[in-house]
Image (cartoon, rainbow, N blue to C red):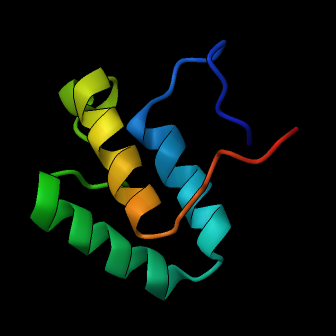
Amino acid sequence: MSMTAQSPITLEAIGLAVRDALGSAAMFQVLTTRLIIQFGVDLKAPAPEQNTDPALIRRVQEALQRMGIRAGDKAP
């Protein structure tokens, strides 16, 4: 899944891309727990008001990049 400027990015889409990139349910759970603690965001089931919040999405993307997770950045 490629997240480009043309398609709206949601936390739900980020969660799916991260889950695919990690390939491990256990690692995804660890990551989700870390994001819940840091930002109050559950990538498994984001709250509707959080799902499309551009500022929160940017913070989550930056946190993922700092952790070396580049989900959704793959070229088509």
Answer with left or right where residue 46 lies relative to residue 74: left
* Residue located 53% across and 40% down the image: 13
- Of 49 and 57, nearer the camera is 57
Where is residue 57 shown, x and y percent of the image?
A: 33, 35
* Residue located 74% across and 42% down the image: 1
- Of 57 and 24, nearer the camera is 57
Number of marks = 0
Query: Most extreme residue toward the right, as rendered?
Result: 76
Query: Most extreme residue toward the top, as rendered?
Result: 6
- Would you say residue 37 is visible in this rendering? yes
Where is residue 76 shown, x and y percent of the image?
A: 88, 38
- Of 34 and 74, nearer the camera is 74
* Residue located 61% across and 54% down the image: 71
- Would you say residue 53 is visible in this rendering? no
38 above or below 26?
A: above
* Residue located 59% across and 57% down the image: 70
59 above or below 26?
A: above
Q: Quadrant of residue 18?
A: bottom right
Where is residue 23 shown, x and y percent of the image?
A: 65, 77
Answer with left or right where residue 75 lies relative to residue 56: right
Where is residue 74 shown, x and y percent of the image?
A: 76, 48
Query: Most extreme residue toward the front, as rendered?
Result: 66
Q: Quadrant of residue 56?
A: top left
6 above or below 62?
A: above
